[in-house]
Structures are given as C-alpha cells and as structure tokens.
Amino acid sequence: MIDLFWPGDDLAGDLMSDGAFLSAMVAVEQAWLDGLVDAGIAPRQARADLTILLADGDAATIARRAGADGNPVSALVLMLRERSAEPTARWLHRGLTSQDVVDTALMLCTRDVLIRIGDEFAIQVRALTELAETHRDTSALARTLTQAALPSTLGAKFARWLTGVLDAAEPIAGLMASLPAQVGGAVGSLAAATELAGSVEGAIALSDGLAATLRLAPTPPWHTTRWQVTRIGDALVSCCDAWGHIATDVTTGCRPEIGELAEGHGGGSSTLPHKNNPVRSVLIRRAALTAGPLGSILHTAAGATVDERSDGAWHTEWATLRTLARHTVVAAAHTSDLLSGLRVDPPRAAANLAAAESLLSEQRSMTELTGRAALPGYTGAADRLIDSTLGRACRFVKGAP
C-alpha cells in the first residue's frame, strides 16, 4: 500500500491492507467449512480449497458491492458460492454471520501487526540497552518545564526511554496469545450452529475448532462487548505514547542551541540546503499525536453499541483499527531506525551542563538539613536505576518474566 497523505505508510507493507483483510475473511470461511465437514455435519464432498476461488481484482469488486449490505461479507460469500460447485456452495458460511467473519478476520490481521511490532521492539530494546550502557556516566543537564533543573546523565535519560518501551512492549506478547475468535451466529447465541450440530456441546466444539484452526483463543461470543477491540487499540496507543516521548526528546535535543542529539540521517529541505531535519522523529510524533484520538474512537464506538449488533458503532471500528494499526507499525519502524542510528554529543552535553546556573541549590538545602558533607555528582540513585532497567531489558530479551 501507499499513502501520499501519510509518508512512510509503505513501511507497513500489506499489513491490514484490503488484500490482507480479504485473505483473512476467506481463512475464516475455510476454517468453518472444514470444521463442518470434519464434524460430519456437512458431507465430505463439500470440502474445498476456497483460496483458489479468488482472482485479481476481487477486493475491489467486493468493496464496491459491500455498500448494499453494509459490510464486505455478504458480497464475499455470494462470490464464493457462485464459483463453488455443489455441495460446497450450499454449506459455505452456514451457521456463521457477517460479524463472525469480520471480527475474526480483524483478529487475524491484528496478530500479524503485533508480530511485526514485537520484532521492532526487540530492535529498540537492544539499541536502548547499548545507549544506556555506553552513556551511563555521560554528564548531562536534566530539565524540567523546559528549564535547567539538576545534573544527570544521558544514560539516565536513555534508561527512561527504555522503561517506556518496555512498558509498551511487555503486554504485546500477552495480547498476541489471547486474540479471540468470534463465533456467535446472528445474535451471538450460537443458535444456527446448535441447530446444525444438534446440541449446544456440538456448537461450542465447532466454535472452539475454528479458533484452534486459526490459532486464536476460544472465547464465548462477544458481539456487542467490544473490550476485545478497545484493548488492542489501547496497546497500540501505548506503543505510540512511548515512541512519541523519545521522538520529542530527540527533536528537542537536536535543536542547534542544544545539540546533544542528532538523527543518524536527517531529512532535507526543498529550499534550504543547510537543513538536516529530524524527519524520523517528526514522523513518530505525528503518529503519537493521532494515535490517542483513534483509540478514543474505538472506545466511543464500544460505548455506543446497542442490541445484539450495533447500528454503526461496529462499522466504525474497522477502518479506525486499520488506520491505527498501520500508523503504529510505521512509527515502530521509524523508532527502530532512529534509535539504531542516534548520534550523541557528550562534549556538547557537558558544555550545556557547565553553562547552567544554580544547579546545586537543592543539594545545599539538603546538606544544611543533615549537616553532612555533600555527596559528589548529585545524581542520586541514577546508576542504580539504570541497572534496574537494564536488568528488566535483559529479561525481556530472554523472554523471562
């Protein structure tokens, strides 16, 4: 995919693309059809490979036809039935509803997104670990509310970045392991599946079988309980929050009057040859600024659900989740690039620290209270805190809790 309105969108590849969504919907239909045959509900002659029925241009055709019923599943099922022989056509999609297919397909697409983000996190944790270790003792000025505050180290700053990345990264693995299938039928009661299977137990076995085939978590129907979607949105927003913090620190640190940080390869200007713009950071901040509002749309939709299938709120989720997911993947790639190539200027950091005034006034007030001689450096427990964060990063890399 390409998007002139979102430079770098191509870094997300086919993730959450129309083609990926179409393939995921067909995978759901395939798993259900196979489950019906395996359970002896549909005749063995109904078994068929649905993927070979697709042709170039099908996504566009389905998209154009989707407006008739408000979702792409009806058009997809009609197309597959028209291209299938009997008895496949008769048994295809029986017992499912459009929401089952859309929701489960979104989970499949989301899993691919989370895998990619997890790969990027691994790169970022390694890069930040190296930065924190290398600059553990690199003296630098700590600032609060944009003003000079206290002596610190660049290692402490990088450890804080690492903490934010770990806070966002650690839940991703758990989320990947618990993405749910959705099988509930028309109103989320498994009525059609129960009728087909002849028992409630048989219907639940069909639902669990579909989840197992697609490597998703077996879950009771969640038609109008949309926490499964909002928690994905929250995780993606948290990722962008962590990366946005890093990018904002970099854009500040690379200002010429500060000059402590620089991107490994900045961007140019159409009219100013001397510019070396922190483009990676700018594009990461763009994602961080838009992620929260996109996540809030998912929550707004969740709060507007009604009855056993919502009239518009459910439909709002699809493109919102796709946009948030792709933006997050792009920001992940940019952050990995930024951190892997980040340039640090220790002499400039030391000069900025030396130029600041009254940095030890707090320390003097502490020694007056205690009557003890001042400790050197006045960086407190920074070194211990760095060690703690690096230990956490090591456990993350090894996959330990």
Image (cartoon, rainbow, N blue to C red):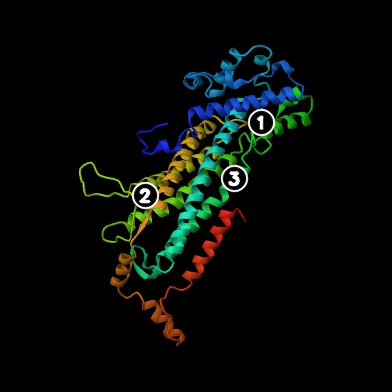
Residue type at the position of mark 1: Val
Judged by depth in the image, the label closer to the viewer, 1 or 3, is: 3
Is 87 above or below relative to 312? Answer: above
Q: Measure the alpha-carbon separation of dots 1 and 3.
A: 19 Å
The structure residue drawn at horizontal position 64% and vertical position 24%, both measured from the top left corner, is 30
Q: Measure the alpha-carbon separation of dots 3 and 2.
A: 27 Å
Q: Residues within 10 Å of mark 3 (few under 14, many from 20)?
A: some
Which residue position holds label 3?
A: 175
Residue type at the position of mark 3: Leu
Residue 204: name its quadrant: top right
Q: Residues within 10 Å of mark 2 (few under 14, many from 20)?
A: many
- Would residue 15 be visible to someone looking at this image? yes
Q: Measure the alpha-carbon separation of dots 2 and 1.
A: 42 Å
- Would residue 238 be visible to someone looking at this image? no
Image x and y of residue 116, in percent:
51, 42
Image x and y of residue 228, in percent:
59, 40
Which residue position holds label 1?
A: 183
> Could you say which is closer to the camera, residue 133 or residue 31?
133
Q: Residues within 10 Å of mark 1 (few under 14, many from 20)?
A: many
What element does badge 1 sit on?
A: loop
The structure residue drawn at horizontal position 35% and vertical position 35%, both measured from the top left corner, is 5
- For marks 2 and 1, the one nearer the N-term is 1
What element does badge 3 sit on?
A: helix
Left or right: where does residue 9 sit relative to residue 112? Answer: left
The structure residue drawn at horizontal position 36% and vertical position 55%, both measured from the top left corner, is 250
- For marks 1 and 3, the one nearer the N-term is 3
Give the number of the disc on residue 281: 2
